[in-house]
Amino acid sequence: MKAALVASPGQLEIASVSLPPPGPGECLIRMRLGAVNPLDTYVEAGLVGSGAPYPRVLGVEGVGEYQGSDVVVFGHGIGTVRHGTWAEYCVAPADALVEVPPGIAPETAATCGVTGATAIRVGLDLADAKPGERVLVLGSSGAVGLAICSLLSGTGIHVTGQTTNPDKAVAVERAGADPLVASDPASFVSQVGRIGPFSVVIDALGADWTSAALGRLSPFGRLVSYGTSAGPEARIDLRSIYRNNITWRGYGGMAEDPARIKDAIKRALVEIAAGRMWIPSGPTMALEDASQAIRATRAHTEVGRIMLRLWG
């Protein structure tokens, strides 16, 4: 079969491979679409899953067909330490499959393993925002940020969505949030003084964005970190945390219990089917364009996840 292989760190190629037959508790899925995530770029660069043998099929999530039904494929090391979803077929543990309810587009279902589950765990469970509260979402024009904005804005919560790209402010507004265009932390600080304070800050950026946002949290507020796309290090005045009784929570999907992830995927599908969560779809590319998709994902040029078409 045709697949996108990481032959060695930083070397991605399209090649024909043979998968081993499914073992006990495993299934053979005919893949339809593979979503392209920042995590895939880390695996391709050798930053995640480097201890697993090469070559290896890339792709941590996607949607495929199993026993006549569309299924989300995600978790259990798929695309990190075992062959992933960017191929015509994928061998996966049965527990890595979640059936897609009728009416949900494959392009949306293909993002529910990472984007959907993260939005549920971060936006609903860890943020624990209540109607009437004000929430700031840093990095809101990313796929997860938009999903979180749409989840919260429909429940009586006032959401402000920060983006560095003015062209993406329309998507933030479409997700139900008030766009705040700030290209750097200094610009953010100069603008955000007229807003808030916030009960919750949801942070996908890190670096100095985190310390800037802490200054806009109200006493007993919550900070939820789930990414560091601007950088992994920040200078924090710890007094701003303990003097204001701030709770700081972190989320990393790779450390989550697989059963909790599966439950979050199911909940995401329910929210999408009910129209309470919006996950935008990016462009669909051919499998042969996987390297281009990786580059575009690193550059954050698209609104929504890029899809790789695997068949059909």
Image (cartoon, rainbow, N blue to C red):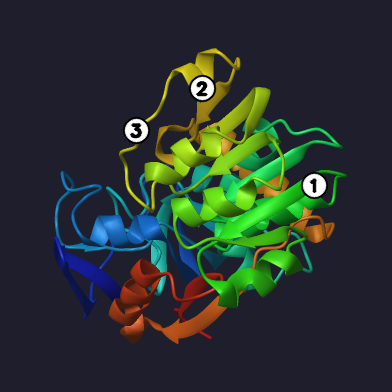
Residue at which label 3 appears: 235
The kind of residue tagged 2 is: Ser
Marks 2 and 3 sit apart, C-alpha to C-alpha, by: 12 Å
Marked residue nearer the N-terminal end (1 or 2): 1
Residue under the image location 30 percent in, 50 percent down: 80
Quarter location, residue 89? bottom left
Residue under the image location 56 percent in, 13 percent down: 243
The kind of residue tagged 3 is: Arg
Q: Which mark is residue 297?
A: none
Is residue 227 visible in the rendered image? The answer is no
Q: Residues within 10 Å of mark 3 (few under 14, many from 20)?
A: few
Per the image, label 1 sits on a secondary structure element best described as strand
Q: Residues within 10 Å of mark 2 (few under 14, many from 20)?
A: some
Marks 1 and 2 sit apart, C-alpha to C-alpha, by: 23 Å
The kind of residue tagged 1 is: His
Q: How many marks?
A: 3
Q: Which of the image's four quarters has the N terminus? A: bottom left
Rendering coords of residue 226 (x, y %): 48, 41
Q: Residues within 10 Å of mark 1 (few under 14, many from 20)?
A: many
Residue at which label 2 appears: 240
Residue 233 relative to residue 161: left or right: left
- Whether 10 is drawn above or below 254: the answer is below
Rendering coords of residue 254 (x, y %): 40, 39
Q: Which mark is residue 158?
A: 1
Quarter location, residue 193? top right
Marked residue nearer the N-terminal end (1 or 3): 1
Rendering coords of residue 67 (x, y %): 60, 63
Residue 282 relative to residue 206: left or right: right
Is residue 49 visible in the rendered image? The answer is yes
Residue 167 relative to residue 148: left or right: left
Question: Which of these two is toward me, 31 or 33?
Answer: 33
Rendering coords of residue 269 (x, y %): 71, 54
